[in-house]
Image (cartoon, grey):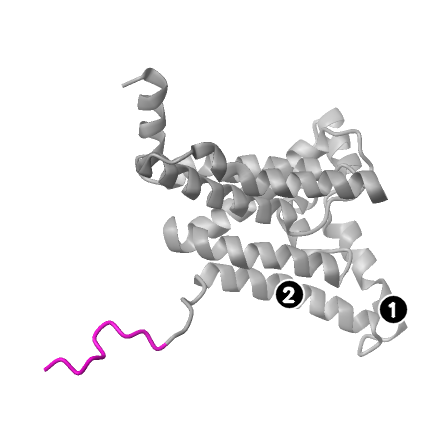
């Protein structure tokens, strides 16, 4: 007997993919510990320097990367920085902005492409964004989840781009979000000054978009057919 509840979903929103929740908890947890220490809640006077020490040991330094390039030495503790810097932020505001993109874009990518695609894109984009940033003559440390989050924006853009291809829509409109974000960064840079970390963000976006051709079944073959004019 049909009781009228068939297909009823008691949850008002779809749950986040587990990998998105895991990344969020780790990123938020690190910042919460550091913020609490800086507020004097625990750790004593030396806790104020925890953030600086962690950034020194686990942040991505362009100078260290260039030293490795010049000497041909690749110590593991420095290579590790490529996957640890996304969990360190200059402050709570930077972390909050990064996790907003992580949650929004990660949810879409996880639901459409797959749960495992989220960490693959996040870490892959973080690594590639940092490597590109390492070639820029810039002394500022690279911190935070933004290159990885921009990679997920690249994944989201791929979804819109592929969907527009299937429906016959304008595929260039899929890139409106990244164009808007880059425009906002440029405007803020002109008004308030900025460093070159936007290079890592843009590199992360391109990496995230490109990784989808590997992660989405048939996407690479479809692109090759299109390039050949089949």
Q: Tell me if label 2 and label 1 are in contact, CB under 8 Å.
A: no
The mark lying in front, picked from 2 and 1, is: 2
Query: From the viewer's perspective, is residue 17 above or below residue 217?
Result: below
Asked whether the viewer can see residue 218, the reply is yes
- List x then y, in percent, for residue 117: 43, 49
Towards the viewer: 54 or 133: 133
State the quadrant of the C terminus: top left
Question: Which residue: 30% across, 35% down?
Answer: 218
Residue range (magenta):
1-10
Dot label at residue 46: 1
Question: Which residue: 79% across, 50% down?
Answer: 56
Where disc 1 sits, the SS reads helix
Question: Which residue: 70% across, 64% down?
Answer: 31
Question: Which residue: 35% across, 34% down?
Answer: 165
Residue of label 2: 28
- In this view, which residue lies farthest toward the front? 169
Report whether 207 appears left or right of 70.
left
Towards the viewer: 211 or 76: 211
Towards the viewer: 64 or 187: 187
**Dominant secondary structure of the magenta stretch?**
loop
- List x then y, in percent, for residue 75: 69, 39
Pointer 1 local density, CA inside 10 Å: few below 14, some 14–19, many at least 20:
few
Where disc 2 sits, the SS reads helix
- In this view, which residue lies farthest toward the left? 1
């Amino acid at each position: 007997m049909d009781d009228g509840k068939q297909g009823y979903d008691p949850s008002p929103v779809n749950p986040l993919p587990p990998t998105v929740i895991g990344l969020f908890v780790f990123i938020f947890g690190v910042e919460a510990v550091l913020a609490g220490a800086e507020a004097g809640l625990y750790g004593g006077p030396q806790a104020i320097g925890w953030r600086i020490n962690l950034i020194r040991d686990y942040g991505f330094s362009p100078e260290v990367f260039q030293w490795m390039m010049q000497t041909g030495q690749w110590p593991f503790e420095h290579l590790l920085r490529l996957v640890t810097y996304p969990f360190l932020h200059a402050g709570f505001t930077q972390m909050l902005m990064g996790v907003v993109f992580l949650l929004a874009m990660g949810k879409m990518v996880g639901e459409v492409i797959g749960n495992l695609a989220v960490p693959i894109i996040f870490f892959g984009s973080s690594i590639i964004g940092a490597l590109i940033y390492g070639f820029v003559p810039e002394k500022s440390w690279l911190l935070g989840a933004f290159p990885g989050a921009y990679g997920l924006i690249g994944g989201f853009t791929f979804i819109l781009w592929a969907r527009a291809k299937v429906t016959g829509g304008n595929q260039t409109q899929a890139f409106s979000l990244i164009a808007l974000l880059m425009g906002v960064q440029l405007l803020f840079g002109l008004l308030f000054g900025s460093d070159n970390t936007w290079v890592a963000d843009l590199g992360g976006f391109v990496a995230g978009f490109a990784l989808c051709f590997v992660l989405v079944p048939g996407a690479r073959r479809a692109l090759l057919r299109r390039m050949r004019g089949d």
